[in-house]
Amino acid sequence: MNNDIYLASKPRYDILDGLRGVAACMVLLYHLFEAIAFAAGAPEQQMFNGFLGVDFFFILSGFVMGYAYDERWDKMSVKDFIKRRLIRLHPMVIMGVFIGVIAFFIQGCEKWDGSHVSLSMLMLATLLAMFLLPAPTSMDVRGNTEMFPINGPHWSLFFEYIGSLLYALMLHRLSTKVLKLWVALAAVALLLMGLYGPDGSIAYGWSSQPVNMFGGLLRLTFAYPAGLLMARMFRQKHPSTLKAPMFLICSVALILLMNVPSFHNITLNVFYQLCCVVIFFPLIIWYGARGSVGGFKQQCVSFLGRLSYPLYAIHYPFIYLYIDWINKDIHPFGSHPLATPVAIAVMSLFTASLCVLLYDEPIRKWLTCKFLK
């Protein structure tokens, strides 16, 4: 029995797919509120903790990887696993870079300080981004130390690749006892980084500055193994299915947790963020995995899950355009302060939907037939 038949035979966690879509929509709103706060000159935005959607993605990714592949390593090579991850992730990486370059041209090929970026530098930065390689300072085409200045949120995909490699080369071999110790130590390290690091939170990873990259690695090395550990425990316990509307309950919980504003106190902020990633998010995933949906609801939840990754991968270039319009006092969708953010959200969702139907799923199907059959 080959891997494709095996994976197709395993039941899907539809609610977890849908929750991924909810988290992606919340990250979109987080970035929109960030731009709105910038336009208003506010010191911080309302959705202060919306960045935690990335940690939710990491935990969920670890859970799904453990569920799908932990029992298959006697029949699957590291090479096959890496090919699967590339086919799953990289088509949208390329599309995200393509849309990011278009947005950069629309902005006039300028850094945020107004200085012009040469075509040769943009081409080199684009080449690095296509291979998901962090841009060095000399190729920072935006000038604000983003690890991936063509499409900022791709930093988390870079760490997702690292998580996949860690899983394939080492994590799946660890005993449950060692994995528990790993998760506990990583949680302590993440807490210390949040309390004593320069940002006063755990919102690290997006910048090419060494301390920021290290913080992003800490977020990954807690969240991804935590998801793997949960998958093992879930498989061992075989908890019964819940009849409550778990998608609704888990979605509301996730939305509320990501909407909590700043406590205006570093210690409280960091402890809240750690409570989310160590306690609340794992509970949401655990109980979400125990629920089920059917009929039309299942179709809606399924499409939300299919939309999640394309939406995350392509939405930020539209945010770049919004910030550029703010800087230049341009109002392409009217003078009402919410007109442009709403238009940006609609454009992002529409573009992501097109990517699902016309690009991501068809190209992945073709690549799977080409390289995995």
Image (tube, rainbow, N blue to C red):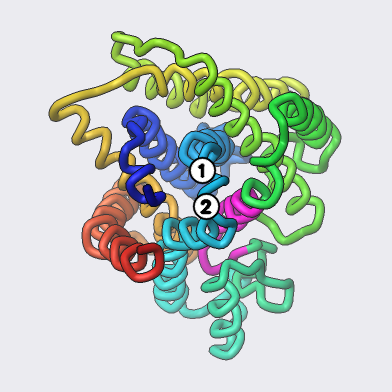
**Where is residue 32 shown, x and y percent of the image?**
44, 46
Crowd class of label 2 (few under 14; some 14 to 19; many from 20; radius 10 Å): few
- In the image, is residue 105 above or below residue 204? below
Q: Nearer the viewer, residue 157 or 316?
A: 157
Residue 310 figure quarter? bottom left
Magenta region: 148-165
Looking at the rendered structure, the secondary structure element under dot 1 is: helix
Residue most extreme to the front: 1
Residue 194 figure quarter? top right
Could you tell me if residue 319 is visible in this image? no
At 58% from the left and 90% from the top, the residue drawn is 120
**Where is residue 245 shown, x and y percent of the image?**
29, 14
**Where is residue 68 shown, x and y percent of the image?**
46, 39
Left-right relation of 299 to 6: left
The residue wearing badge 1 is: 72
Left-right relation of 215 to 321: right
Q: Nearer the viewer, residue 41 or 370?
A: 370
**Where is residue 41 shown, x and y percent of the image?**
56, 46
The residue wearing badge 2 is: 76
Q: Are marks 2 and 1 in contact (CB under 8 Å)?
A: yes
At 39% from the left and 51% from the top, the residue drawn is 2
Callout 2, which amino acid? Met
**Which SS type dominates the magenta stretch?**
helix
Looking at the rendered structure, the secondary structure element under dot 2 is: loop
At 73% from the left and 72% from the top, the residue drawn is 137
**Is 159 one of the magenta-colored residues?**
yes
**Is 212 one of the magenta-colored residues?**
no
At 59% from the left and 51% from the top, the residue drawn is 164
- In the image, is residue 223 above or below residue 104? above
Could you tell me if residue 108 is visible in this image? yes
